[in-house]
Image (cartoon, rainbow, N blue to C red):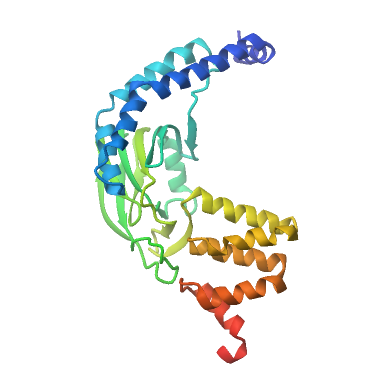
């Protein structure tokens, strides 16, 4: 029977679909209550402090003994062989060169298992500007290269990303070294000022990665490896990104009634959220937004070019 015929049968067989769903739900219950998840949770309860460094040290210990990963693969293999439509019930973490699954997540960190494909990596390196991006995630992370694929990486540093970050003071990144990874090697990266780039590989990389949520910088920052100059930044927290997206959507929909609710975010702790909200308020109703703009120009603690420009515009020609 061809795969197309099998899929057609599954789509028309409610009993089969039900079995698939029940098997996936059963796997989730067993995994969530199992020894692996319990060991991860216990490690977070035993932290000596609630710092990113303490979480990273615990993550290194959890990734050092990767028998839990072998158990995970074996646990998934049987239902996937039995039912071709059994989908591993984990949240995906994927991009154009990497495919992974998040197998543990709490307020301290997430742990993912995945594969980086060297063919797509090579294609990106030969594409226009593909090899020139160096990203600093704003978070600490721990990486175990279960299979390193003969990868050669470059190591990078940049000025620390803090709550007082400005594009004007972003400085330049610098390359600090290069090395070839070995199977089983563990690498800790403080994404608030460190990064690495896979320069080349001879095969796929099998990777376990712990991303630390504690003490994260408000922004991730990107530099150009050719010029070493700052390129862009983006929010590291989902909440900040959602506020930006929703306020933009409300402005585009012409939702004037949402103006007071949007204005409530002008006190957000992240400066870039405050500024984004201010821009959207100006787009919704410039006259109503002017008093808010004047208050922001007078009181906002963050000092960057955009805010300086607003201050000059609010003050009028005499201030220029």
Is residue 80 shown above or below 36?
A: above
Number of marks: 0
Q: Which residue lies at the image location 60% right of the left edge and 77% below the top edge? A: 294
Q: Is residue 291 above or below residue 39?
A: below
* Image-based side of 186 in relation to 10, left or right: left
Query: Up-down: is 249 above or below 15?
Result: below
**Residue 76 rendering spot, x and y as whole percentages:** 43, 18
Q: Based on the displayed image, in which of its 4 quarters is residue 156 positioned?
A: bottom left
Please name whichever residue, 149 or 81, is drawn nearer the observer in this view of the structure. Answer: 81
Q: Position of residue 236 (x, y in %)?
A: 46, 52
Q: Is residue 147 visible?
A: no
Q: Is residue 93 above or below residue 317?
A: above
**Quarter containing the N terminus:** top right
The quadrant of the picture occupied by the C terminus is: bottom right
- The residue drawn where x is 37% and y is 50% is 139
Q: Quadrant of residue 57?
A: top left
Specify whether 251 is left or right of 222. Answer: right
Judged left or right of residue 156, residue 304 is right
Residue at left offset 46%, top offset 39%: 97
Closest to the observer: 184 or 240?
240
Q: Position of residue 177 (x, y in %)?
A: 25, 53
Of residues 88 and 25, the one nearer the viewer is 25
Residue 50 visible: yes
The x, y position of residue 50, in whole percent, is 31, 47
């Amino acid at each position: 029977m061809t795969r197309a015929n099998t899929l057609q049968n599954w789509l028309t067989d409610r009993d089969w679909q039900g079995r698939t769903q029940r098997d996936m739900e059963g796997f989730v219950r067993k995994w969530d209550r199992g020894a692996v998840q319990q060991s991860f949770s216990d490690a977070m309860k035993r932290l000596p402090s609630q710092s990113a460094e303490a979480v990273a040290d615990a993550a290194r210990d959890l990734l050092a003994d990767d028998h839990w990963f072998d158990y995970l693969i074996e646990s998934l293999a049987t239902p996937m062989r039995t039912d071709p439509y059994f989908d591993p019930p984990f949240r995906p973490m994927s991009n154009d060169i990497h495919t992974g699954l998040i197998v543990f997540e709490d307020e301290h960190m997430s742990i993912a298992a995945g594969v980086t494909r060297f063919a797509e990596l090579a294609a990106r390196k030969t594409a226009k500007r593909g090899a020139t991006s160096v990203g600093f995630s704003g978070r600490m992370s721990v990486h175990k290269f279960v299979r390193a694929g003969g990868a050669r990486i470059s190591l990078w540093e940049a000025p620390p990303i803090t709550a007082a970050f400005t594009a004007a003071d972003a400085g330049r990144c610098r390359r600090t070294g290069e090395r070839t990874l070995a199977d089983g090697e563990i690498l800790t990266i403080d994404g608030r000022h460190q990064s690495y780039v896979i320069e080349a590989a001879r095969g796929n990389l099998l990777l376990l990665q712990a991303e630390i949520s504690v003490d994260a910088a408000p922004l991730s920052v990107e530099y150009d490896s050719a010029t070493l100059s700052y390129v862009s930044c983006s929010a590291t927290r989902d909440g900040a990104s959602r506020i930006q997206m929703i306020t933009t959507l409300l402005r585009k929909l012409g939702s004037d009634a949402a103006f007071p609710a949007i204005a409530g975010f002008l006190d957000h702790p992240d400066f870039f959220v405050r500024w984004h909200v201010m821009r959207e308020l100006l787009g919704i109703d410039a006259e109503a937004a002017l008093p808010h703009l004047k208050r922001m120009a007078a009181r906002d603690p963050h000092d960057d070019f955009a805010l300086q420009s607003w201050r000059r515009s609010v003050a009028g020609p005499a201030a220029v």
